[in-house]
Amino acid sequence: MNDKRFVETYSQGATNVRKIIVDTQTGVNYLLASSSMTSGCGLTVLTDQNGKPVITPVNETK
């Protein structure tokens, strides 16, 4: 069993940061974005073209 509730599956940038974080219990993908990690950031559910949450099968996050 994975001890981490959230895992980072993608990361881009050092100043303009973009990360995809997956909830290992639900498979829901989140997008974290920041132009400077010291001045705040935004986090939102990553959705497909129909507005439904992007889900990664839970067994792929372990």
Image (cartoon, rainbow, N blue to C red):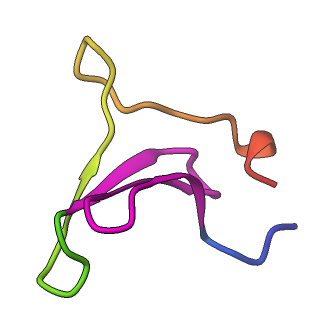
Residue 40 lies, with reference to residue 25, above or below; the image says: below
Residue 3 is left or right of residue 7, and the answer is right
Residue 34 is left or right of residue 24, and the answer is left
Residue 62 lies, with reference to residue 57, above or below; the image says: below
Q: What type of secondary structure mainly makes up the magenta span?
A: strand
**Which of 26 and 39 lies nearest the eye of the viewer?**
39
Question: Is-magenta flag for residue 14?
Answer: yes
x and y percentages locating residue 59 in the rendered image? 80, 43
Residue 49 is left or right of residue 20, and the answer is left
Identified at 33% across, 20% down, the residue is: 48
Residue that protrudes farthest toward the front in the picture: 14
Question: Is-magenta flag for residue 6?
Answer: no
Q: Which residues are magenta?
A: 7-34
Picture quadrant of residue 53: top left
x and y percentages locating residue 35 in the rendered image? 17, 64
x and y percentages locating residue 17 in the rendered image? 32, 60
x and y percentages locating residue 45 in the rendered image? 30, 46
Residue 23 is left or right of residue 4, and the answer is left
How many numbered marks, from 0 up?
0
Residue 2 lies, with reference to residue 48, above or below; the image says: below
Identified at 82% across, 55% down, the residue is: 62
Residue 49 lies, with reference to residue 11, above or below; the image says: above
Residue that protrudes farthest toward the left in the picture: 39
Quadrant of the rendering where the N terminus is positioned: bottom right
Identified at 61% across, 71% down, the residue is: 5
Identified at 14% across, 79% down, the residue is: 40
